[in-house]
Amino acid sequence: MLRLTPVVKNLLIINIVVFILQYTLQGMDFTGLISLWIIESDNFKPYQYFTYMFAHGGFGHILFNMLGLVFLGPLLEQFWGPKKFLIFYIVTGIGAGVLYSGIEYWRTSQLESDVTAYIIEPTPDHFSKFADEHGRYFNSKVYDFANDYSKNPEDPYYINQSKEIVKGTYQSLLKGSSMLGASGAIYGILMAFGLLFPNTQLMLLIPPVPIKAKYLVLILGGIALYSGLNRGSGDNVAHFAHLGGMIFAFIMIKIWQQSRDKFY
């Protein structure tokens, strides 16, 4: 029988309560207030580095995150104690948000620079290059437009329309790019488990096969890195937040292992 430890139990309750509030307070955009927005957005607030990790995008999202929390969290809390486990959970969650923000800041700056360059020199070739480099922000219709634009390179309509599409890409990013979920902290828990109990067999849900913790950490870390670097159109998963949780978890555990005389 699964036994919940105090901190894990309280974190589970908080996540469930916040999830309920997200649906009961939709009129005041409660989810938007506590999600983590990119730094350039007017919606960004520093407190979101903490609040985003208690919000979720749907039932499946919170279900899988909470399963990870209740199955692995109690073992770490018993191993470290409640206070140290809570510090670990919060720091890895915030760390995941920090890495996400840094990556998104770099991506947004690159996009802004490319937008400015295109506005200065709009041509069909430059538009096609822009669409290829920032394809994850577009749907397939933009390539139909690029094809028509290439056939009418001097047409003022296509020139002005291409500028609006390019500028709209950046504006849409500012208005719609946010992150939420406990995944960063959960990936941190997984990293900790893999480092502390590397040969423990874990049973996957999909597919239902056993795997050693150390191998699961390597696989999921590799997937997060690959997916983050090759993020495609329609991919709304914050892969670098997952990776950030694992990185901060690794750093914290190595520091604690070198300072065994200090117990938080």
Image (spheres, rainbow, N blue to C red):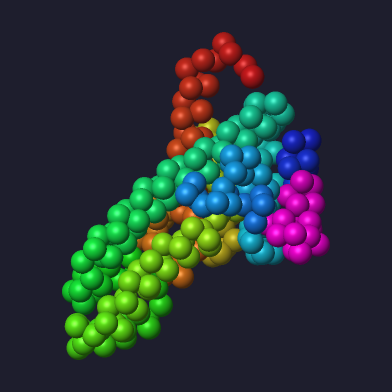
Residue 222 in sight in this render: no
Give how far across and how far down residue 95 sits, in percent.
52, 38
**In magenta segment, residue 198:** no
Residue 79, image quadrant: top right
Residue 59 in sight in this render: yes
Give how far across and how far down residue 210 sits, in percent.
54, 55
**Residue sitting at x 20%, y 88%:** 151
Region in magenta:
13-31
Give how far across and how far down residue 60 sits, in percent.
65, 64
Task: Please tell me which residue lies in front, 3 or 120.
Answer: 120
Task: Please tell me which residue lies in front, 197 or 147.
Answer: 147
Task: Considering the whole magenta stretch, tell me its main secondary structure.
Answer: helix
**Residue sitting at x 62%, y 35%:** 90
- Please tell me whether residue 61 is drawn above or below residue 71 in the rendered image: below
Most extreme residue toward the front is: 156
Residue 46, image quadrant: top right
- Describe residue 233's horizontal placement relative to residue 9 as left or right: left
- Describe residue 207's horizontal placement relative to residue 80 as left or right: left
Most extreme residue toward the top is: 261
Give how far across and how far down residue 232 sits, in percent.
39, 67
